Image (cartoon, grey):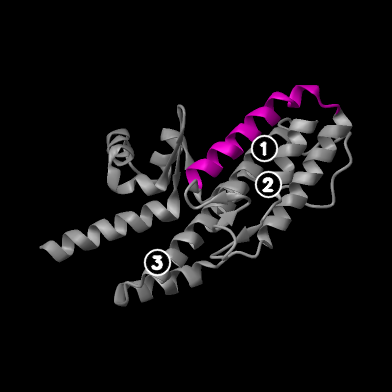
Amino acid sequence: MERINNLLRELKRCEYAHLLDEAPSTYNGFSETQGLEGYSKYLSTLFDHAEDALSLLSDSQKTTCRQRLQEIKQEQELFDVPSKETLAAINAELQANRNAELRQERDFILLVRGCVSLQKDYTNRFLKHFIPSDKSPNSTDEVETPPIPLIQEEESKQDSEWAFGYKEISETFHWGRNKTHNFLKNPKYAAAIQRDGRKIAVNIPKARELMQLSNNKQITKT
């Protein structure tokens, strides 16, 4: 249970500091230098360890974990992070004013939003282990239904800012395998791609932002 608790504690954390004199900018202890890749690897390790411990849980512990994950999902929606509108406003200002401090602020906002997006995705992925797969309209649930309704898979995927694996990346962007392969190999889009061994994930908003920038450059050249 300790390994599962380690993951749950991290999923509900939202602690960040930006441009403090005494310390570097960080999110949950991870600096901008470590970036999304470092935080992604950390969460991936916690997730793998928690998955390994699932077989040791009793039914009552599984019910408790499901309730805690649902509570964490609600807490994550209340995380005090810069909004998409704030990010869009900074990007618009950077088009007219290439201010170094403003760019640094934009990069940190991207880090915070990316880390929170990772937390939400790992929460959804772990919650799937606790959703009964044999439900039917006439079935009787022996476990008391928690007060917070379950999030359906379609809803959680729609809210996700990450696509995991070749298949999901292809489906998200409506690409064939060759185009997906070329995208993942293109260094122009490296900032939107996270790798951990054989695992691969794409930050959807960042990928679209980089593709839009690439298209704008091509139009300017012509």
Seen in the picture, residue 209 relative to 152 is either above or below; the reply is: below
Q: Secondary structure at mark 1?
A: helix
Residue placed most toward the observer, 48 or 74: 48
**Residue displayed at 50% across by 62% down:** 109
Image quadrant for the N terminus? top right
Q: Where does residue 42 sit, x and y in percent of width and height? A: 59, 38
Q: Is residue 101 magenta?
A: no
The foreground one among 64 and 97 is 97
Mark 3 vs mark 1: give the one in front: 3
The overriding secondary structure of the stretch rendered in magenta is helix
Q: Mark 1 belongs to which amino acid? A: Phe
Residue 126, numbered circle: 1
The residue wearing badge 3 is 103
Q: Nearer the viewer, mark 1 or mark 2?
A: 2
Q: Do the residues under discs 1 and 2 have CB atoms within 8 angstroms?
A: yes
For label 3, the SS is helix
